[in-house]
Image (spheres, grey):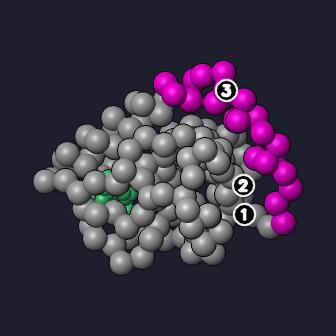
Amino acid sequence: MLKHLPIYACGEIVRGFGRGSKELGIPTANLSLEAVKSLPDSLQTGVYYGWANVNNGDVHKMVLSIGWNPFYQNKEKSVETHILHDFNCDLYGQILKICIAGYLRPEQNFDSLKVLIDTIKSDIDSAKSLLDTVENKMLQGNSFFTNKLEKFLIC
Ligand SMILES: Cc1cc2nc3c(=O)[nH]c(=O)nc-3n(C[C@H](O)[C@H](O)[C@H](O)COP(=O)(O)O)c2cc1C
């Protein structure tokens, strides 16, 4: 399935368990179940990098986790995006667009929360440099990110 990257997806941001901000200090925007289902079944679980925007705003670098979060043993599959930008507001109910550009690693379980956090920070560093290539920067300018939205809230 990786040969089909990049993949574009769009959906409403819904509430997760809230651990991203509180426990990890790495907030994530969780895509609605409808949007999760719109992704190809063959897209393997794991950690990816790419681009994201909210309500057709500026397009930022992001890292993304797809799966069941083995560290927390979630029952539902989730697609969680950490956008490399400080939004000073609550994003629930707003529209997230993502471009999944590349794959980093499989989801893992860890012996401690600290190792999970350190691993995600290392994912962020990898994503920052991988997205600086000419090929990946071109994806940032794709018209998908500015195509009209039917309905959105302003933050
Ligand atoms: C880049 C990235 C990598 C992640 N890697 C893992 C992982 O390897 N194992 C895991 O259990 N969870 C992983 N997660 C998921 C986090 O555990 C999850 O975002 C956190 O629990 C917050 O979830 P919540 O928003 O539902 O509270 C990753 C999240 C991100 C953004």
Q: What type is the residue that disc 1 sits on?
A: Leu
Instruction: Give x and y (percent) for residue 95.
Output: 68, 61
**Span colored in magenta:** 129-150
Q: CA distance from mark 1 to mark 3?
A: 32 Å
Horizontal side of 140 relative to 74 (left or right) equals: right
Label 3 packing within 10 angstroms: few (<14), some (14-19), many (20+) = few
Label 1 packing within 10 angstroms: few (<14), some (14-19), many (20+) = few
Instruction: Give x and y (percent) for residue 150.
Output: 84, 66
**Considering the numbered disc 3 on the image, is that residue within a helix, a strand or a loop?**
helix
The reply to whether callout 1 and callout 2 are in contact (CB within 8 Å) is yes
Q: CA distance from mark 2 to mark 3?
A: 24 Å
Mark 3 = which residue? 135
Instruction: Give x and y (percent) for residue 43.
Output: 54, 58
The residue positioned 56% from the left and 47% from the top of the image is 2
Q: Quadrant of the C terminus?
A: bottom right
Mark 2 = which residue? 55
